[in-house]
Amino acid sequence: MALLHRLGLAALLLTLASTAHAQTLLVAADHSLTAAEYAAKGMPPIGHPWHEDELRRAVGVLQKIAADDPLKLPRLGSTASGAVFARLVAPLLLPHAIAGLPQDGTATTLPREPTTTAEIQNRIADLSGYAQPLGALALLYAKPLAGDFCFDAELVESTRVALEVNGRMLLLINRARAVHGATSPPPWLRQAHQQVSYGTVLTIRGALFIYAARRAFRPQWRAELATVLQNWVPTLMSLLPQTTHAEMLAHLHGLMLEDPQGYADWQQLQHAMTFAEHGPPAYAKVRPPRRGRHKRKK
């Protein structure tokens, strides 16, 4: 996980924490551009799955557009920009699997799952490259919550894809651990496990804060977000170190107490997360990766 991704998620948490229980927001008007208009501003063509650098370039273009007018961001299901938004939240076909795909971006079969250690390591690296721009994308759709309108459908979808990316990386790490054995993992696997686990914890916390921001959602989209959380969070927790579970459950419990209107939904999610505590054990504690080693005093 890139440092910028973690900082972006932290900023997202602060934004949502300060707006969770204020007056309900209006859904943003759709002033989005067409695919050709986004392309004229520097966005990559949407006719093929994007590589990591293409997704990063696309999000960079949207950051400049949103700084001028966030209502011009792509929208889910929009006649003007729906295809652009769909490409933004579907970057998960990996670069080495793209060459044989049709130009319209569809695929008749899923890419082959990695089996060797080298393939797993490369796949984890590919997916981790998507994490930072996807975190930045979610932040773009969350920022207006500090104002007077919201992007509820887009916020749900960007949250879903962020959870999915982390889930895929954790599953790959779990597969690599099965190959090597938990007692003797290579250094790259230990580092990947630590960094991805730390990023996943932040992503889950961000998703829970988003769910607590009741004013940001129409009822059907909050229900859709609840489904996303119930589908992904227990799975993610089953793959995370058990030392992280108590803190996340305490975090969820605090949000649940502050949202009596949605208590039943929170309780259902809490039950699923508690069940996830029986997942596989992990060999590394989750903590922020060190920026550098400190010199020992003589």
Image (cartoon, rainbow, N blue to C red):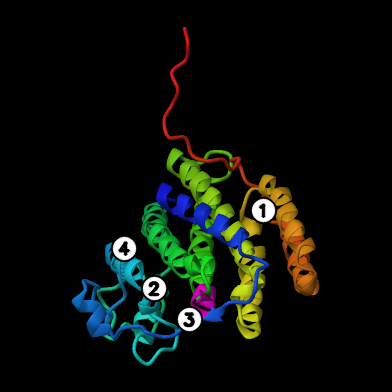
Mark 4, secondary structure of its residue: helix
56 sits left or right of 158 in the view = left
Label 1 to label 4: alpha-carbon separation:
34 Å
Q: Which mark is residue 70?
A: 2
Q: Are marks 2 and 3 in contact (CB under 8 Å)?
A: yes
Disc 3 secondary structure class: loop
Q: Is residue 145 above or below residue 291?
A: below
- The residue sitting at 52% across, 52% down in the picture is 10
Q: Is residue 194 magenta?
A: no
Residue type indicated by callout 1 = Pro
> Does the magenta run of residues contain 151?
yes
Residue 144 x, y percent position in the rendering: 48, 69
N-terminal of the pair, mark 4 or mark 3, is 3
The residue lying at 78 percent from left, 65 percent from top is 271
Furthest toward the left, the residue is 40
Pointer 2: residues within 10 angstroms few (<14), some, or many (20+)?
many
Q: Residue at x 47, y 7 (%)?
A: 298
Instruction: Write down the region rendered in magenta.
Output: 149-156
Q: Secondary structure at mark 2?
A: helix
Please state the horizontal and vertical placement of residue 216, each as a whole percent of the image: 59, 74
Q: Is residue 244 above or below residue 206?
A: above
Compared with residue 2, is residue 147 higher up or lower down, i.e. above or below?
Answer: below
Which residue is identified by label 1?
Answer: 280
Circle nearer the viewer, 1 or 3: 3
Q: Along the polypeptide, which appears first: circle 2 or circle 1? A: 2
Residue 17 is situated, as x and y percent measured from the top left of the image, at: 62, 59
Q: Which residue is mark 4?
A: 56
Residue 235 in view, yes or no: no
- Between the residue at mark 2 and the residue at mark 1, the CA separation in whole angstroms equals 42 Å
- The residue under label 3 is 28
SS of the residue under disc 1: loop
